[in-house]
Amino acid sequence: MNQLPETPSDRHAKQRSFTLLCTIACAVRLVYSASVFLKSSGTAAWIEAGLGALLVLPATVLFYFSIRMRDGIPCKRSPALICILFFPFFTFDASAWIYTLSECSSYTTFTDTDVIFLYLPAFLCALLIVSRGAYACGGLARGTLFTAGILLSLALLCQISQMHPIWLMPILGGGAEAILGGSIFCAGTAALYPAGIWLFAQTDPAGVARKVQAGFLRGLLWAALAAVLFLLLYGMLAPNIPDAPHIRSFNMERLLTGGGRGTSVHFPSLIGWYLLLLLTSVFSLFCASCCLRLAFPARSARFCSIVSAIFCIPWTPLRMFWRKGEDWMVFLSLIIVSAISAYIWICALIAKRRKKQNDSQ
Amino acid sequence: MTANRCTYGRIFILFALIFCIIFPLGGCSQASQPENQAIAIGLSVDLADSGGLTVGVLLPTIRAAGQDPEENAGSSKYEVYCATAHSFAEAITILRASLPLSLNLTQLKVVVFSQELAQNEDMQALVSDMYLTHRLYNAAYCVVSLARADDLLRAAGQHYPGARLSSAIVTSMENYIAQGGIPQTRFADFYYGFHSIYGSPVAIFGAVADGMHTTLTPPGRAGNALPGALPRTGGSQTEFSGTALFLGGHMVGTLSSLETAWMNYLRGETHDIAYSCDGVNISLSPERSVRVAIDTQADPMRISLRASFIVSGKCSLDILTSLIEADIASLIAKCQSLGADPFLFSQRAASQFPDIPAWTRYDYASRFPSAQIDIHVEVQTLTD
């Protein structure tokens, strides 16, 4: 069957879908890192998520302005080296999220199936979606927003009578120092959001419409709002125990069994959470594939997707056996993304001035 | 070239789909199927005579036709399987090794500890071990048994006529909670209570009735009888009534059914309370949740309570008010003497502090026993 050529409006739709994918992935990252990875969140998980989003804002703004200043002209110097720099972070991230999804599956299944057997189907599923291109990823994002949004909202609404606002007190949780440490971690996981959008914009510079550029910043705002709201509601459902922070956190076990929640809410929560985790891993894998496409333009998108997936596999042992390594990777990604955003912005600024000088001459 | 790529793509998708189908099928062995697992409904933990722990699981057993003439073919009976070891994990390992089917703890409805064990110093460590046990259902009701925990579990497995035990246990607990006679404690809450900096954990108090108790309770004080000593007869041997109080990682005391109803009210619940005044049985409906004001700046700390009820039944309101005030005051004094705060006053006090370090420095636990309590009760009849 012959495919119709892609029109500008198609490209804009693709960009919008991808921005939506990034936004949802960013919200999930903020929620997850504010509540699972952190040992100090206490009652202030929602503040950490909000502050984490705020820490990513400078990098997001710099990426945004660099795209805008280029105004459709691709960044000549950057791709190959920058993409190679980004690539390990995206592959690690994809691997970590797929592993998280498999861990959740492991808990909820009756059998003692090895995590790796649950990891592989989820991994292949993400690969299949990514190999179908940006439309498939965007479609997943739209579907997830609708399905997971409704299901998780239902699950939370069913428990509204069990919510205790007093469980959000003391308002500053573990204190200012703990909040700062937590928000840096949140920012580290969310930092790949602007990097992902910038990468995708580089694959199709002409397709980046002004509308999409605006959505770039708005996406972060929506992600932060959604994460903060979810953590606030969830915080009212679980008692606060700073001495045992891992059980205070939002993890699958707590969601499904802890604290006497009705079993009726388990199933919708489960489907919603699975969809969100799958989408987050799809985002990272797709961005990793974008990195390869930009670094090796001669290669096809599908080839890049498969190679990216293969590169994800060596990261799995790190996620499984060395939790501290994961913390380092997250922290490093914040540093790298922030530094690259500044570099790209300076490059764009120089390019713009040169263009002005050339125009005036 | 394009055609080749398309073919490769299809082959790739085909392989990926086959893998997707094959890998999940890897877990579907005969022993792993839900109907072939030993799905435990209850879990008991006792101190063994040898010094270790005896862990029991309540399992349904399907009887074949003709095996038990009193039972219908295919009907379920429940049996308790026990194992003794030095630790909980070891006991579970022995149970897993000795049971012919795979032991599954994801569907637990009740977790029972014996009082002897609950009073032991190692209780907190045991609860932590249990909580971290893979796939142990943490929303099971948490009970402390007056005598042996496996006896309570065994008794629970025998007398729920006409009902499936897994749902009957939950139904009966919900019934007791609605009456206010037991706290609404799940195993997760119990575990959190041990680690919380806001209060001490509580558990449901239960016992096996021996049918030997015939002593009447004082007039109007039927709610003060503890489980196991209720003057009654009947088929069901289990009695869940009252609260086990914990402090510092082990059990320090008990509350009766009526005291538990007051405790639940002070924790913010609004269930009706069955009460007796002047020899008349009445029902007290909380008009709203209790209002608690805590002055942490005062020395000693001052806790002011404002309670208001609507009473259905005829009795002197003045006498009733003073009775309620006396009941609440004596309950709080009892808990203060034990040092335990099961009323969650500490959570309200904590909201006055900016962060957890400031709250921890305040050292609420040492101030609670000497706190000054002001109680103000308003009672009105339905016609007021």
Image: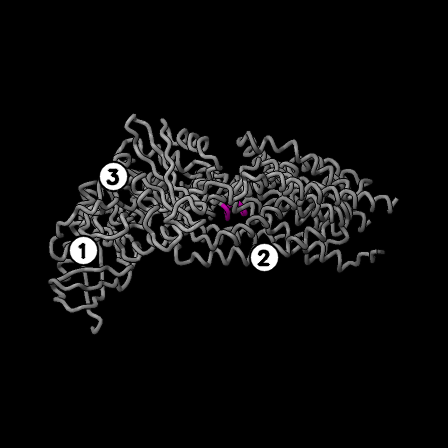
| Callout 3: SS | loop
Per the image, the residue denoted by label 2 is: A147
Does the magenta portion include A243? no
Q: Identify the residue at horizontal 38%, vertical 44% (top origin).
A: B78
Could you confirm whether marks 2 and 3 are on the same chain? no
Depicted A47 relative to depicted A87: above or below = below
Q: Is residue B158 left or right of residue A246?
A: left
Estimate the spatial distance between the alpha carbons at disc 2 and disc 1, rounded to whole Å: 50 Å
The tag on residue B147 is: 3
Amino acid under disc 2: Thr
Query: Which numbered disc, 1 or 3, marks the residue closer to the eye?
Result: 3
Per the image, the residue denoted by label 1 is: B375
Tell whether label 3 touches label 2 (CB within 8 Å).
no
State the image coordinates of residue A134 (x, y, percent, origin top left).
Answer: 72, 50
The reply to whether residue A11 is in sight is yes
Estimate the spatial distance between the alpha carbons at disc 2 and disc 3, rounded to whole Å: 50 Å
Could you confirm whether marks 1 and 3 are on the same chain? yes
Query: Numbered disc 1: what chain?
Result: B
State the image coordinates of residue A40 (x, y, percent, origin top left).
Answer: 44, 39
Amino acid under disc 1: Ile
Question: Furthest-bottom residue in view?
Answer: B383
Which segment did they paint magenta? A49-54
Q: Residues within 10 Å of mark 1 (few under 14, many from 20)?
A: some
State the image coordinates of residue A289 (x, y, percent, origin top left).
Answer: 72, 41
Query: Which numbered disc, 2 or 1, marks the residue closer to the eye?
Result: 2
User: Which of marks 3 and 1 precedes in the sequence?
Assistant: 3
Magenta stretch: helix, strand or loop mostly: helix
Q: Identify the residue at horizontal 77%, vertical 52% (top origin).
A: A206
Q: Is residue A286 left or right of residue B350?
A: right
Quadrant of the image for the N terminus of chain B?
Answer: top right
Query: Numbered disc 2: what chain?
Result: A
Q: Identify the residue at horizontal 43%, vertical 36% (top origin).
A: B132
